[in-house]
Amino acid sequence: MSLVQPVDNVALLPGYLAAGTAVLVLLVDLLVARRAVTVAVAALGAAGTAAGAALVGAAGERRTFCVGADCSWVWGGRAALVAVVIALLTLGVLAISGPLLRAGRTPAGEYCFLLACAMTGGVVLGAAGDLITLLVALETLTLPLYVLVGLRRASLAGAEAAVTFFVVSVVATSVTLLGAALLYAVTGSLHLDRLGGTLAARDDLRDLPLTTVAVALVVAGLAFKVAAVPFHAWAPATYDGAPLPVAAYLSTASKLGGVVALLAVVQRALPAGVTGPVLAVLAALTMTVGNLVALRQRRTVRLLAWSSVAQAGYVLAPLGALALAAGRTADARAGAYAAAVAYAVFFVLLELAAFAAVVALRPADGDGGTLADLRGAARRHPWVGGAFALALIGLAGLPPGLAGLFAKVTVVRSLLAGHAGWLALVVALNAVLGLAYYLRVAATLYAPSGGVAVARPARTVAIALGVATAVAVVIGFAPQLVLDVAAR
Amino acid sequence: MTFGQVLLVAVVAVPAVGAVATAAVPGDRAGRLVGTAAAALTLLATLPLVGGEHGWFGYGPRPAVQPWHQLDLTWVPGLDLRFHLGVDGISWPLVVLTALLTLLCCGYTLWRVPAGGGSGRALVALLLVVEVGILGTFLALDLVLFFLFFEVVLLPMYAIIAGWGGDDRRRAARKFALYTLFGSVLLLVGVYLVVAAAGTADLVALTGGAGLSRDTQLAAFTLLALAFAVKSPLWPLHSWLPDAHTQAPTVGSVILAGVLLKMGTYGLIRVAVGVAPEGARWASPVLGALAVAAIGIGGLVCLAQSELKRLIAYSSVGHMGFVLLGVATLTATGLQAALIGNIAHGVITGLLFFLAGAIKDRTHTGSLAELSGLRETAPRLAGLLGFAAVASLGLPGLAGFWGEAFAVVAAVRRGGPLWLTLAALAALGGALTAAYLLRLLRRVSHGRPSAAVAPLGPGLAGAELTAWAPLVVLALAVGLAPALVLSYASGPVEALLGVVP
């Protein structure tokens, strides 16, 4: 075996673009030191990354950093999809950060740099072919967020949120790392496909108690990242303490990162017979607890946070179909993974729209406030309020929010194709619970009077909201676009 | 595209475009006018749908569903969803009824916008969106598309109740939304249970069981029947209905009672019985017993009601009980009774809710204790109320008679101790219907005028007469010539029953 590895730089291009964006932002902030320029460079970089990721992904699968047949970097359809979505989410979050950065309590250069770093982690994540690359990418995605959460100067809530997030996240990462180490001890490999192959071929290894412990640790650690119940307690406090755009990033890009990591290990490395039942229980618990607690929330961001906990449950639900032998046929498995990815894409889009609307309806630099602050907002700002209501209804999964409806349909369909009827019923009943609070928020928006009047929303926020809503409407009528890329 | 296909698209597209136009046109009255015009165009588009090939002239066994016109386009292959619309003798009368009632409601809104804060334009737009959902549900020949349209209705109806309803409207609207969503998520699971097992969502191919195993059919029928039982509503899943009807504005109640409930009974016949016939056979005694319980309990509750709209709402529980009893017998007579009962209930209860709304608007009360002597001060209104009540209690010669009488006949013909008992109890329930409706008339029309009724004038507005006259005529016409509905339905019903074991 040659010690010099050939490196396919084209496959790595999206990663270069993302990392280059971060460096460029840092330099521009240092040399030009103008807020608008810094933000523009970051936005251009994010757009360029998305374009590069899509271009490289369209040309077919490319692999590099290979040892024999095992590669640490696989740029295929899934990687391209994840990278494009993360880069676009970064762009969206940059757009809704305008009022926050203009308010002056948050340093623009650092903010954009950290966001670009997080984007780099997300772009690498989808391509990761071994456990270490995967975990490093995931940490690169989350590490900048610890700082971003607490970046507002003189904000006690922000500092508290940052510390909570930091402690929980570090513990989660070490738990996952321990699991990865144990897996290495058992099988002698870290590449996802080789791990999966070894565990599938050798019953004796699969039945070792150590393997079970290792699998449990990896899954539990990653469950922290997606805020699945019972590893969810950090999320509401962190979201509520963070600046609104950062909370949006946490509940979209960061959550998507966790889902992608979990999906990668479940799909390729870990034995489905072990992870299936665990994920089924996690999913059922996550959506039920998330929805039940969300019913009682009075603060806007906390409600969205709990609802996003519940949504993580819907994302995990298709994977729960692996719990039964009938759900582990090749067809059912492929359907389940595609459904999870598709749901995640539908969800992050609607969630971004919802957060953009909250930013638009709140004063610059303000926090999410209470639901009562939003009373009658849709009567004062019909377009923004209408878009917010549409996003909420989409999250609840009902027409006219067709994107959300098709997302739920995708999940239920994959569960029934995998003979997991009970989990499909749990998903269905949770949709009813979900509607109860989404409807409460939507009704509050259209309440006759009250609330806090705010100025016209900033132009960038309005554009982000408009684009997100337009995309949601388009894929609501043509969901096949998402289903096709999710299945690749 | 053939003329029939153009019509099918138009029936769904015209109200949808109309809703957007209504919301976009500047000016409240102009918006309402545009909406009413769209509703009128929709009604015009539904009428020629009746032309087309009605018989079966092909070779081989007759298919269980044989649409007069159909349109089949791919939409989302990844979810087995096709844009497949079609119309036949089971759906066409309901389609026309929906278009007619929506037009009457839009026209009524042109004249009077219910108090409560919202603009009349928005109300008309929402009525049109509800119409899209209902018409789509009746026309869909793809299971997933059926589910999709079934869901479309939910939020606009919620908004109508919450935006223009009575004092307790928010709670009633929320209850309506959550209950009916509960039903439709069960529908979703049931739909994909069938689709996953059969590999297709085409209702034409699925009708007759499509080789589904008995277990799948039982599970599917349970889920689907529960879903439709919430919508119909079947006792004991009916408790959203009285609140929603009582709180909804007049036009909301009319649509709700007139056609929205029919989505449940139509779904039961077309989807639940069609797709899982073995399950239907298996569950028919339970369904029959629940239907009779609904008739009895609805009647008893009505006897004790003291509020006008609530009484009419509970009477719907009883009437829909007769419809469901007809379906449960799984005989040609029973299904025919159910279909004509659907239409009759839509016409008569629509009229009753219009009249109750008119009385409440004039007297500002719905309490039976405060209403009496209506015929002294407003004889025309009292006369119409008497006509509607008598039609509702099933007097021969009016529309209500056929559905109720033949549901009982079908149960008797089914034979056996269970069905004979059910038939006897249902007949008794029919007597209860007469009792509470006559009590209603005695309280409201007769006696000395109460303080609320005394200042009323005898006149009726032109808009009111225009909205009510078609319903009065239809109640008479369907009563005298039931063939108006039955002649179209008999072929499809026999084809459907041909596949029920």
Image: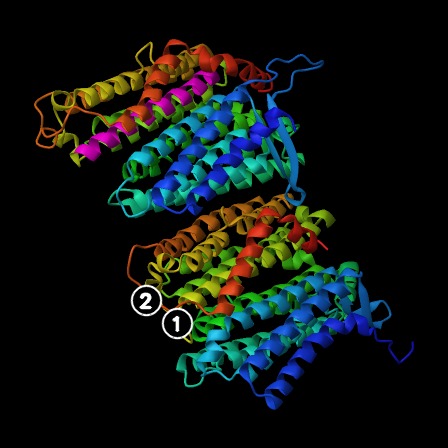
Q: Does the stretch in magenta take in A58?
A: no
Q: Name the dominant secondary structure of the magenta segment.
A: helix
Callout 2 amino acid: Val
Above-or-below relation of A355 to A135: above
Residue identified by numbered label 1: A363
**Magenta run includes residue B351:** yes
Residue A355 seen in the current view: yes
Question: Can you give x and y, in whole percent of width and height, for residue A318 in the image?
Answer: 61, 52
Element carrying mark 1: loop
Residue position for label 2: A452
Q: Position of residue B267 (x, y in %)?
A: 50, 30
Query: B488 or A156: which is nearer to us?
Result: B488
Say which chain tag 1 marks.
A
Where, by quadrant of the figure, is residue A64 drawn?
bottom right
Residue drawn 61% across and 20% down?
B64
Q: Which residues are magenta?
A: B333-362
Report if the CB atoms under discs 2 and 1 are less than 8 Å apart: yes
